[in-house]
Amino acid sequence: MNFDKDTNRMEDALKNALRRREAPEGFADRVLTRVAERSSATPVVLRHQSWLRLFAQPLVRGAAATAVCAALVVGGIHYRNVQREHAEGKAAKQQLILALRIAGSKLQLAKSKINEINVNHVPADQTGNQEEKE
């Protein structure tokens, strides 16, 4: 039962805290005036200069230079790896083509020898039949 009472109290407190309230008089005017003052006081050029001022600090400048150098080194290493893989693939392709040519020529040689054996070798039955025909 205590739990239900505590829960109800908390819900009531939340409802009171989150209840819609009217803004005080002149609130909107004060906000708009302050926004207008800030936008007119800070020109766009100063915003960019404040961004560039960050790089005026030696630590930030050094960190940025180090990051750029590291990115260049990593990019160069990656580029070299890609080039090496490409060259290895090209070499493997050339080796495969050479192996296929050698295998094809060996097959042609074997085929011609088999054909030569078949032409030169006449079975005995065919020889006898040829003599009878003559």
Image (tube, rainbow, N blue to C red):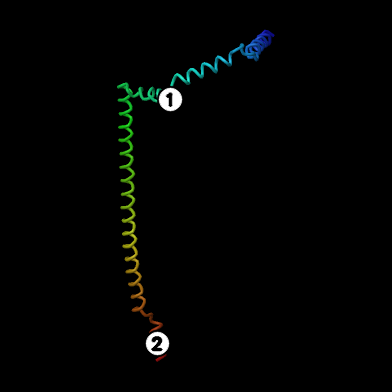
Q: Residue at x 44, y 20 (%)?
A: 42
Q: Position of residue 35 (x, y in %)?
A: 51, 19
Q: Position of residue 36 (x, y in %)?
A: 51, 19
User: In the rendered view, would you say 94 is above or below 21?
Assistant: below
User: In the rendered view, would you say 116 is above or below 86?
Assistant: below
> Looking at the image, how many numbered discs can be counted on the residues?
2
Q: Quadrant of the C terminus?
A: bottom left
Helix, strand or loop under label 2 = helix
Q: Nearer the viewer, residue 101 or 25?
A: 25
Q: Residue at x 64, y 10 (%)?
A: 13
Q: Residue at x 35, y 70 (%)?
A: 111
Within 10 angstroms of label 2, few (less than 14), some, or many (20 or more) residues?
few
Q: Label 1 vs label 2: CA separation? A: 110 Å
Where is residue 15, by image quadrant?
top right
- Taking the view exactly as shown, the residue that stands out farthest to the bottom is 134
Q: Position of residue 110 (x, y in %)?
A: 33, 69
Q: Quadrant of the N terminus?
A: top right
Dot 1 amino acid type: Val
Q: Position of residue 45 (x, y in %)?
A: 40, 25
Q: Residue at x 53, y 16 (%)?
A: 33
Dot 2 amino acid type: Gln
Which label belongs to residue 130? 2
Residue 129 located left or right of residue 78: right
- Taking the view exactly as shown, the residue that stands out farthest to the right is 1
Where is residue 16, by image quadrant?
top right
Q: Nearer the viewer, residue 127 or 1?
A: 1
User: In the rendered view, would you say 23 is above or below 118?
Assistant: above
Q: Which residue is mark 1?
A: 44
Within 10 angstroms of label 1, few (less than 14), some, or many (20 or more) residues?
few
